[in-house]
Image (tube, rainbow, N blue to C red):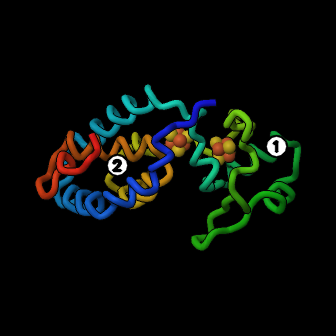
Amino acid sequence: MEIDKRLLTLAKDAKEVEKETRKYFQRLKRRVPKTLDITMRDLHEEEFAKTDCLSCANCCKTSSPIFTEKDIQRISKHFKMKEIQFMDQFLERDSDDFYVLQSVPCHFLDEVDNSCTIYDVRPKACSEYPHTNRKKFIQITDLTVKNAEICPATFSIIEKLKKAIPLGGKSSKETKFK
Ligand code: SF4
Ligand code: SF4
């Protein structure tokens, strides 16, 4: 299986522009353009039309989704397990008291072909990841900066956003990213 080559340098690339990105989002928050959510949705769709998540799965390999009560009910039912048993076996509470995986890579990831073995009942957070097309995107810019270190598609979307809505300061044209 081909691996998404962007993964090879993603951590370094994301670190390199992290400060610039945080400043960009700070400026964006001062005056949120009315078109922001539409622009993000378009950039998201454009990026994921050419991203093959099966050649990546870096989110499933390195981070945990949040499991809501409904997720836990649905997934434990899928396994014909008692919810408490499912939680004991796979989940723990994080510092914000959310249920997350006890370990990564995710237990439900098939590491041979990068598929999700519980795809139809996977947590809502997984189906919505990396949230770059969600409404009121401006509320999740901190999370998105973090996700850019994990998700090559998120990284590209942010770099394209900087060009689509330029805000002055050091422009992304001055970075090596196109
Ligand atoms: S449940 Fe599926 S989509 Fe979610 S992290 Fe695990 S393998 Fe990935
Ligand atoms: S959502 Fe991002 S990190 Fe997850 S598999 Fe797709 S490209 Fe990779």
| Number of the label disc, if any, that sits on residue 4 | none
Q: Residue at x 40, y 44 (%)?
A: 132
Q: Above or below — where is 84 with respect to 6?
A: below
Q: Amino acid at mark 2?
A: Lys
Question: Ligand 1 lies in which image quarter?
Answer: top right
Local SS, label 2: loop
Nearest the viewer among 147 and 42 is 147
Q: Residue at x 64, y 50 (%)?
A: 61
Residue farthest to the top, as pictured: 49
Give the secondary structure at mark 1: helix
Work out which quarter of the rendered image holds the C terminus and state it. top left
Where is residue 1 drawn, in percent x and y? Answer: 64, 30
User: How far across and how far down the image is residue 94, in percent?
Assistant: 63, 69
Decide if residue 73 is on the left or right side of residue 96: right
Q: Which residue is mark 2?
A: 136
- Answer yes or no: is residue 125 visible: no
Query: From the viewer's perspective, is residue 43 above or below residue 25?
Result: above
x, y percentage for residue 72?
A: 73, 51
The disc label shown at residue 77, or none: 1
Identify the residue at image location x=63%, y=47%.
60
Task: Mark 2: give few (<14), some (14-19) or many (20+) Cα within 10 Å.
Answer: few
Q: Can residue 36 be seen at all in this image of the molecule?
A: yes
In percent of width and height, residue 172 lies at: 21, 49
103 vs 63, left or right, is right
Say if mark 2 contacts mark 1, CB within 8 Å: no
Of residue 135 and residue 155, the one placed in the foreground of this image is: 155
**Within-10-Å neighbours for mark 1: few <14, some 14–19, many 20+:** some
N-terminal-most mark, 2 or 1: 1
Residue 75 falls left or right of residue 160: right
**Residue at disc 2, CB closer than 8 Å to ligand 2:** no
Residue depicted at x 55% and y 35%:
53
Q: Amino acid at mark 1?
A: Lys
